[in-house]
Amino acid sequence: MLSYDFHLDAKSISKLSSKGLCKESLKQQVDEDLTILLELWHAQGLKVIKDRGYFYFDTKFTSIKDAVFCIVDIETNGSKVDKHQIIEIGAVKVLNGIIIDKFEYLVKCDEINKHITAITGIKAEDTNNALELKEVLHKFQSFLGDCIFIAHDVKFDYRFISAMFKRVGLAPLLNRSLCSLSLAERTVTSYRYALSYLNDTFNLNEKATHHRAMSDVITTYGLFKLSLSEIDSNVKTVEELIKFSKNAKRLKRPKFDPFLMEEEA
């Protein structure tokens, strides 16, 4: 029976993104036919290719300018994947710094508490005519494809969407991911790295409505472009960018909030 989970150890994943993983090492960790398994992984958003006898993430060879990044943001009616759900999802595909496609849906939800409404402005009745979660997620899976998944504090959005995929009968996400917050910490100097604060600092999205999915996506898009403009010139491929976002030295933050200093002046 084929497995939908990515049962590889951290060392093997590291090799797939760098010097390659031999067939023997890969076969030791999976029981399925490799041809079928690679097709299955690709259907889940992860493309693994073979080159000169070794296996790699295709993003090892994909230049940043040739890669399609999918910037994603979700709003939910709570933070627990076993109890709550997505109520809004927004995404854009970006190629060489240009938005080439957009995805935006409210999701039908019978219960949204007052705290969530106060944050997002979304009420349960606003979703009465929205599509059901399963239908929206099927559409999003097709939209996302094997793009690189980007979000601000990516772990939350990635984990939540993957859990929702499993809830509606889809296989979990395997797309390579990139955190715009972590990348920003290594490319732009700021007192804080919350998306709203970064927008105030760098004017990333003049029409920002914080905690609405597409608005936060557009703000993240502006931040991503800014970060890329400040990136080390030696970072050329997607995997090098992912590695840089995790391992490069964080920039030193100012000791004092410049906005407070302006107010006190």
Image (cartoon, helix red, strand yellow):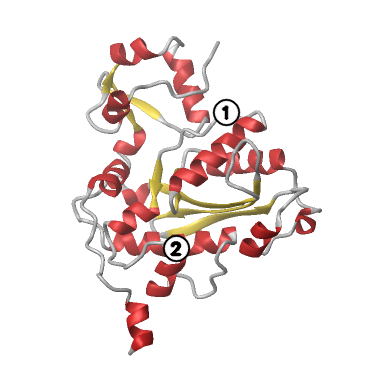
Q: In the drawing, does residue 43 fall left or right of residue 195?
A: right
Residue in the image at 49% along x and 45% along y: 156
Quickly name the residue at label 1: 171
**Res 149 visible:** no
The quarter holding residue 193 reads bottom left
Of the residues tagged 1 and 2, which is closer to the observer?
2
- Residue 11 appears at what percent x and percent y? 27, 25
- Residue 131 appears at what percent x and percent y? 75, 47
Looking at the image, residue 108 lies above or below residue 119: above
Of label 1 and label 2, which has the lower sequence position? 1
Q: Quadrant of the C terminus?
A: bottom left
Quickly name the residue at label 2: 195
Residue in the image at 36% along x and 11% along y: 27
- Residue 224 appears at what percent x and percent y? 38, 59
Question: Do residues under tags 1 and 2 come within 8 Å of each other at their CB atoms?
Answer: no
Amino acid of disc 2: Leu
